[in-house]
Image (cartoon, rainbow, N blue to C red):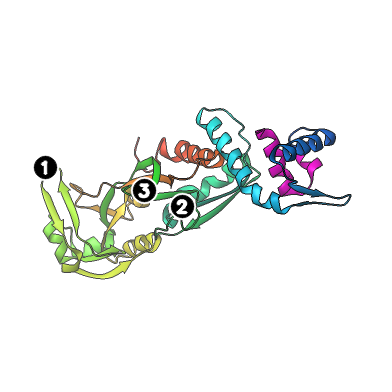
């Protein structure tokens, strides 16, 4: 089956105009009409109804269209995997990411990406709560977690180092903890859960801290609000380094127990459903994020 004719059919179905679809592919109207007629003969069905005033999809055309789109996406993905194919992409890309990370690092670079790909629409779902990629029909997601779901595939964007910090005002009033056990004497801000945390010292020692056993009366599941409460002196909290590195540099937050790190080995992953074809638009957006963020993470000192 001629994939270029399939591409013409998909464009004609979107535009409801065979001549306009042909022009986008550099074809004269007569050539475009001939290609469509040849495709319909090869599949044994009229895919488009033509009249002097309009073009519409036939019942067979409606049924055939998703398969034609899939064939084209697979061809584009195969070419993209080899560094070939067109850089022009169109359609809609559904992407989900943690809201705090997106505000800091993704939203500011979107205008540049959108300027490079003017026929592409980004549909962003930003939330610190994880969503199901397949049920939500998402093409791509950013997650700061371990990749355990076998139905997903991914590429590492960057490490997600997590640290303890507090405001100078809080520490001036309550003092600096010297050991992990001292945390039980402090106000703790938990992120969404009060599960136990494992701390590893520079000397290799291991400690377990249970927020439930401390003064933990503030539990927040939104990253931005979590940091704001810490800045306001609400207590000691665990934060991703990417979230607080600017505040640490300016001194509005201070690292607590700097000789210890959280044992959580989380990573920022760009993930996509394994069953889906890695389309050209997804590959381009992934490569863009890896280049602009992953190559030199802004929160890592160089």
**Of residues 211 and 168, which is closer to you in this image?**
211
**Of residues 152 and 207, which is closer to you in this image?**
152
- Place residue 74 in its image quadrant: top right
Horizontal placement of 18 versus 65: left or right? right
Residue at x 35%, y 64% (from the top left corner): 221
**Of residues 234 and 160, which is closer to you in this image?**
160
Q: Earlier in the sequence, mark 2 or mark 3?
A: 2
The C terminus is located in which quarter? top left
Residue at x 79%, y 46% (from the top left corner): 17
Q: Is residue 220 magenta?
A: no
Q: Earlier in the sequence, mark 1 or mark 2?
A: 2
Horizontal placement of 262 versus 68: left or right? left
* Residues in magenta, as a range: 1-22
Q: Give the numbered dot on residue 102.
A: 2
Q: Regarding mark 1 in the picture, which secondary structure is present there?
A: loop
Q: Earlier in the sequence, mark 1 or mark 3?
A: 1
Residue identifier under label 3: 242
């Amino acid at each position: 089956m001629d994939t270029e004719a399939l591409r013409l059919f998909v464009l004609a179905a979107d535009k409801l105009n065979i001549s306009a679809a042909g022009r986008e592919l550099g074809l004269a109207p007569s050539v475009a009409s001939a290609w469509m007629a040849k495709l319909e003969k090869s599949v044994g069905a009229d895919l488009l109804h033509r009249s002097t005033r309009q073009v519409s999809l036939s019942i067979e055309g409606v049924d055939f269209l998703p398969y034609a789109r899939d064939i084209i996406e697979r061809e584009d993905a195969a070419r993209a995997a080899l560094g070939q194919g067109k850089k022009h992409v169109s359609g809609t890309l559904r992407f989900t990411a943690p809201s705090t990370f997106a505000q800091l690092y993704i939203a500011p670079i979107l205008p540049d990406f959108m300027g490079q790909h003017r026929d592409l629409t980004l549909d962003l779902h930003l939330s610190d709560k994880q969503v199901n990629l397949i049920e939500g029909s998402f093409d791509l997601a950013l997650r700061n977690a371990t990749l355990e779901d076998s139905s997903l595939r991914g590429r590492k964007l960057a490490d997600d180092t997590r640290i303890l910090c507090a405001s100078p005002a809080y520490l001036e009033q309550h003092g600096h903890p010297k050991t992990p056990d001292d945390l039980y004497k402090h106000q703790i801000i938990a992120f969404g859960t009060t599960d136990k945390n494992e701390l590893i010292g520079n000397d290799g020692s291991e400690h377990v801290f249970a927020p439930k056993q401390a003064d933990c009366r503030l539990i927040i599941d939104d990253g931005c609000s979590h940091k704001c409460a810490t800045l306001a002196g609400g207590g000691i909290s665990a934060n991703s380094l990417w979230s607080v590195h600017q505040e640490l540099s300016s001194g509005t937050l201070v690292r607590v127990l700097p000789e210890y790190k959280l044992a959580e080995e989380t990573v920022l992953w760009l993930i996509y459903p394994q069953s889906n074809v890695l389309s050209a638009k997804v590959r381009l957006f992934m490569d863009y994020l890896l280049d602009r963020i992953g190559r030199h993470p802004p929160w890592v000192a160089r």
